[in-house]
Image: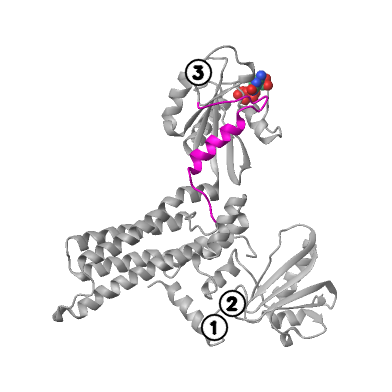
Amino acid sequence: VPDVFFIKYFSIFLQVMNLNFSEDTITAVATPMGTGAIAIVRISGVDSIAIADEIFVGKKKLSECETHTIHYGKIYDSTGDIIDDVLVSIFISPNSFTGENCVEISSHGNPLITKKIIEVLLEKGVRNATPGEFTKRAFLNGKIDLAQAEAVAEVINSRTEVSLKGARNQLDGMLSKKVADFRTDLINTSSLIELELDFAEEEIEFVGYEKLQELILGVITEIDELLKSYNFGRVIRDGVNVALVGKPNVGKSSLLNYILKESRSIVSAIPGTTRDIIREEVSIDGILFKLFDTAGIRESEDLIEIEGVLRSREAIRDADFVILLSDVNDLFSEELYEELLEVTIREKIILVGNKIDLKKERDFSADCLISAKTGEGIEKLFELLKSKAIGNNVYTERSAIVTNSRHYQSLERTKSHLLTALESARSKMSGEFIAFDLRNAENSLSEIIGEVSSDDILNNIFASFCIGK
Ligand code: GDP
């Protein structure tokens, strides 16, 4: 069993015994770099309150104060000079975010001040926290599970309201609860089988093969539901990549500019000026759309254009959707469409006709007709994009959805173990085999909430956090 399993339970044990697992005390600035009204320096670890007392002078010693109280005073450097007047909040273990003794120093929001506070803390033996170390400690001390720890980073990094809701949901334990329910089902089932094995000689049957199949199938169905939510979850979390493709002058930059109402891509009447990929992000109804104006995918002699073509092809390959923009007053470019099909699939391509404000009497077949100049039809275009991206999915506060590829992979592994178990139950194999597969399935599920995980996985997860979280 991986080390982390022991570390976690060992530290919970120590906490119960009112001891702290980590000996060292860590610190970091928790607020963004730059100036502001207030900045917060965070300290966590067994000595944090005692060390804060060494640099802080207020009405009372912090170590004599109660948990969850705030104190006004001054922070001094080692020469006795005042660094700043501050408010200090204290949280006594285990009632803090990390589960350890924690101190938060709110100073004036000048990076020079926080830098000095950190410096005196380092002199007192505190060390700089690594990225995500506060959250990692919260996990190791059993305050939150791994899915919730990951949600902390997502809550911070969400850029649209819907993705924030999704992350909040995960932090509140919606996914963890689902996973816990599945685990209970699996553990109950395999216990029954094991019990049956113990009583093999008496030929007592606790759960028949029929019932067993039914139980396993029930969990598979629910896991399938979660797996299905991933596409929606990914859209919520990462947004939708949309590549804009079209012959020169069809109005790609104009469309982009209309959407963004801010001209960053060059709108010009000279063909081929958009040489590089221009990327813009807009949030529409809480969903993030990332739009790329591509340089074109046609072969070219021009070196800069060749580079542009390569990059465009890459962007198109990675895109969730490709808008093939045409001028409705011109002929539809079959050639370009064929070239697109070399890089992407038909289902991802949306045919859009532009410049309907100039339309002469001619039929032009497209999924959507717009004018980048007047804005006509653009709302419909986004409706179309949205319905293609999220289908009929609606987001409710109580939804458990999978937004994270690590969770998705664990669920896939769980399902595959369950399918093996189901197969064994169908062919009436001995209970040992079925119980073994159910245990495996349960282990894969446990990875999501971090009951079983390797140091590598943990390091990987927390390395993507910002320092101070
Ligand atoms: P791109 O090369 O595809 O990026 O095309 P541009 O956005 O630079 O547009 C080329 C020209 O067509 C510019 O002069 C635009 O003002 C014009 N244009 C773009 N969209 C429309 C539209 O919907 N209606 C009209 N009348 N002109 C447009």
Mark sitting earlier along the chain (1/3): 1
- Amino acid on which the number 3 mark rests in the picture: Phe
Q: Which residues are magenta?
A: 367-396
- Quarter holding the C terminus is bottom right
Distance from disc 1 to disc 3, alpha carbons, whole Å, reads 70 Å
Q: Is residue 315 above or below residue 287?
A: above
Residue 217: name its quadrant.
Answer: bottom left
Residue 253 forms part of the magenta stretch: no
Q: Is residue 269 visible?
A: no
* Residue at the spot of label 3: 332
Question: Quick check: 339 left or right of 434?
Answer: right
285 above or below 247? below
Say what secondary structure mark 3 lies in. Answer: loop
Packing grade of label 3 (10 A; few <14, some 14-19, many >=20) is: some
- Residue drawn at the location 57% of the way across and 15% of the way down: 329
Residue at which label 1 appears: 15
Q: Which residue is mark 2?
A: 99
Pinpoint residue 166: horizontal percent, then vertical percent: 55, 56
Residue mark closest to the camera, 2 vs 3: 3
User: Hey, what amino acid is under mark 1?
Assistant: Gln
Q: Quadrant of residue 382?
A: top right
